[in-house]
């Protein structure tokens, strides 16, 4: 099964190390917002943060 397209530009893999508390916060947000995967939740949270910064 092919992975879904994430936008109009090529994608890249990004690896980060975060704390268990950060994972729990992401998962809590994910479940509250009915986001299907942790990866998608992280992408959406990054998008929200970038927009709030005016980027």
Image: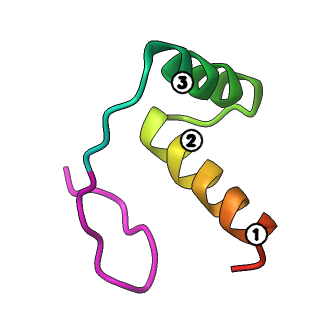
- Labels 2 and 1 touching (C-beta < 8 A): no
Question: Does the magenta-highlighted stretch encompass residue 53?
Answer: no
Give the structural element (helix, strand or loop) at label 2: helix
Query: Residue drawn 31% across and 42% down?
Result: 16
Q: Nearer the viewer, residue 18 or 40?
A: 18
Query: Residue drawn 63% across and 22% down?
Result: 25
Residue 50: image location, x then y, percent: 67, 67
- Please give the label number shown on residue 13: none
**N-terminal of the two: label 3 or label 1?**
3
Tag in front: 3 or 2: 3
Question: Does the magenta-highlighted stretch encompass residue 9?
Answer: yes
- Please give the label number shown on residue 53: 1
- Left or right, residue 11 beside residue 26: left
Residue stretch in magenta: 1-14
Residue 15: image location, x then y, percent: 25, 46
Report the Cα–Cα distance between label 3 and label 2.
Answer: 12 Å
* Colour scheme of the picture: rainbow
Above or below, 22 relative to 17: above
Above or below, 24 relative to 2: above
Q: Quadrant of residue 21?
A: top right
Report the Cα–Cα distance between label 2 and label 1.
Answer: 18 Å
Q: Nearer the viewer, residue 5 or 40?
A: 40
**Residue, disc 2:** 41
Give the structural element (helix, strand or loop) at label 3: helix
**Residue, disc 3:** 22
- Left or right, residue 51 beside residue 6: right
């Amino acid at each position: 099964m092919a992975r879904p397209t994430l936008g109009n530009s090529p994608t890249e893999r990004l690896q980060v190390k975060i704390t268990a508390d950060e994972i729990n916060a992401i998962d809590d947000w994910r479940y509250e917002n009915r986001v299907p995967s942790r990866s998608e939740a992280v992408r959406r949270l990054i998008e929200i943060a970038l927009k709030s910064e005016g980027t």
